[in-house]
Image (tube, rainbow, N blue to C red):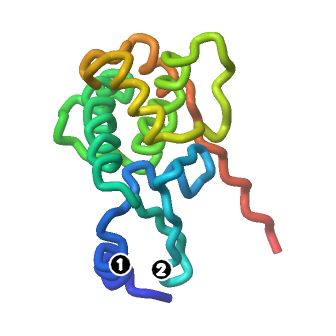
Amino acid sequence: MIDEDFYRQTYHEVNPDHCVFEKGMLTNQCRCSRNQKLLIAEREAASCTDKEAKTRCQAFLDTLQQQARFALKVSSARQKLGHVKAVKVQIGGLRGLYQALHPEEKIPTPVPEVAGMLEEALRVWDSFDKLPFPKIIPEIGRWEPRRRRPKRKR
């Protein structure tokens, strides 16, 4: 068993440009042409190959987390989100954005081309602050992660 502190240190050394939507990429809930999967100590990691895209993704996620605080029942902007809430923001937010951009289409799983979708959103609305959050935020509340199967008794 690998020491978790050592793993985290190694992770940051090997993957300094981690994908902002790593949780979604690794669970096949979203895709991106700028994503590169890595193996670190028999675990998967996701890396971003485009610094501009990563900056754009981080700005979108930061704005989304700020706007989704009420839906997530988080009172402070500084409060760190737990794993499930972080995944809900990432995947639900991307699904909501896809729906806002393509209202006539069914939301696909996985959500395609994250970086391209964010570029499209900026062309349409000029800024992440101007996104139609009343259309995006409900998808965060609706999206549920896959439930783990109960362990079988041996």
Write the residue at 48% across / 40% down: 114
Q: Residues within 10 Å of mark 1 (few under 14, many from 20)?
A: some
Note whether residue 18 is visible: yes
Q: Tell me the SS state at disc 1.
A: helix
Q: Residue 29, percent across and down?
A: 60, 44
Q: Say which label, 2 or 1, has the lower sequence index.
A: 1
Q: Residues within 10 Å of mark 2 (few under 14, many from 20)?
A: some
Write the residue at 32% across / 63% down: 17
Residue position marked by numbered label 1 in the rendering: 14
Residue 36 against residue 91 in the figure, above or below: below
How many discs appear?
Answer: 2
Residue 18, picture quadrant: bottom left
Q: Residue 22, percent across and down?
A: 45, 55
Q: Nearer the viewer, residue 109 or 4?
A: 109
Q: CA distance from mark 2 to mark 1?
A: 8 Å
Q: Name which residue type carries label 2.
A: Ile
Horizontal arrangement in the rendering, residue 137 relative to residue 52 (left or right)? right
Write the residue at 42% across / 20% down: 137
Q: Residue 57, percent across and down?
A: 34, 42
Q: Residue 88, percent across and down?
A: 47, 37
Horizontal arrangement in the rendering, residue 144 relative to residue 75 (left or right)? right
Q: Name which residue type carries label 1.
A: Val
Residue position marked by numbered label 2 in the rendering: 40
Q: Nearer the viewer, residue 87 or 94?
A: 94
Horizontal arrangement in the rendering, residue 105 relative to residue 139 (left or right)? right
